[in-house]
Image (tube, grey):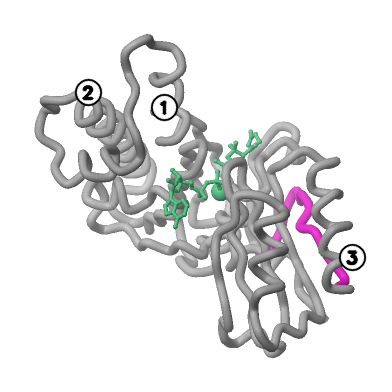
Amino acid sequence: MILELDCGNSFIKWRVLESSGASISAEGIADSDIALIDGLTALSGLLLTRCRLVSVRALEETDKLVVALVEAFGVTVSCAGSAREMAGVRNGYEDFERLGLDRWLAMLGAFKLASGACLVLDFGTAATADFISSDGEHVGGFICPGMPLMRNQLRTHTRKIRYGDVAAERALERLSPGRTTVEAVERGCTLMLRGFVLTQLELARSYWGEDFTVFLTGGDADLVSDAAPQARLVPDLVFVGLAMACPLS
Ligand SMILES: Nc1ncnc2c1ncn2[C@@H]1O[C@H](COP(=O)(O)OP(=O)(O)O)[C@@H](O)[C@H]1O
Ligand SMILES: CC(C)(COP(=O)(O)O)[C@@H](O)C(=O)NCCC(=O)O
Ligand SMILES: [K+]
């Protein structure tokens, strides 16, 4: 069985594939290395042979996780790395190694699925947009605070914005102007993200007319999907790219 990991700034997304790579036998989200290893250990019939991962965390942090995985499961771990060019996509950064690996893998996955120009929108800790033209050129992208960062900045830099997770979830049942603090903040931040989506769509249209595919991914993709009804919601887009960047043969 193959373990795949996407280590973002907030969560580790994981899944276990059958050895052929054809089907998913388990998947989940962990908020720490320990929670990940406990979650995997609790699975019955787990026989890991290989592991591939992508991380946007600090090198030492990623190394620590790799050591823990080797210790716990005796697996060989391969980590996705940067590339100037791969699978027909050319990294557009001046310094290609500085482009976030999750963005790079999502771009590889998107270009493979679209076989044409694409706009990749990822809503995690940060919200990112990346533009890939039909010939595989990465035009560049944008990085903004995502929902968790916007919400936490308001909570920690004001005196009177305080509320819990349950109230936050309930506040997003509608997007009309808020009549409580929690509604005002949660809906306001959601509308900021939707505005971000609309701006990116407008820019993509100015480059490519209607001839492009929009991909939505990341834990908060659902919050903005109404703003881009034409988009393909692909929660595992990073994993599509991970399999391309770390083939297990
Ligand atoms: N099942 C879930 N578990 C945890 N977070 C989730 C889940 N579904 C959506 N989210 C939201 O996803 C966001 C994190 O997205 P994610 O793509 O995991 O970020 P990152 O890659 O930066 O770690 C958070 O705002 C969180 O509330
Ligand atoms: C932009 C990001 C913080 C997004 O991380 P995420 O929200 O997925 O945790 C990450 O891709 C990153 O650290 N990138 C390096 C900087 C760059 O891409 O320019
Ligand atoms: K991510």
Mark closer to the chain start, 2 or 3: 3
Instruction: Give coordinates of residue 236: x percent, y percent.
Output: 51, 65
Marks 2 and 3 close (CB-CB < 8 Å) = no
Using the numbered discs, state the Cα–Cα distance from disc 1 to disc 2 in whole angstroms: 14 Å
Instruction: Give coordinates of residue 184: x percent, y percent.
Output: 21, 26
Marks 1 and 2 close (CB-CB < 8 Å) = no
| Residue named by callout 3 | 71
Q: Quadrant of residue 231?
A: bottom left
Residue 150's tag is: 1
Q: Residue at x 89, y 73 (%)?
A: 74
Q: Residue at x 80, y 53 (%)?
A: 65
Q: Which segment is the magenta one? A: 75-87
Using the numbered discs, state the Cα–Cα distance from disc 2 to disc 3 in whole angstroms: 47 Å
Instruction: Give coordinates of residue 34: x percent, y percent.
Output: 72, 55
Q: Is residue 107 above or below residue 234?
A: above
Q: Quadrant of residue 249?
A: bottom right
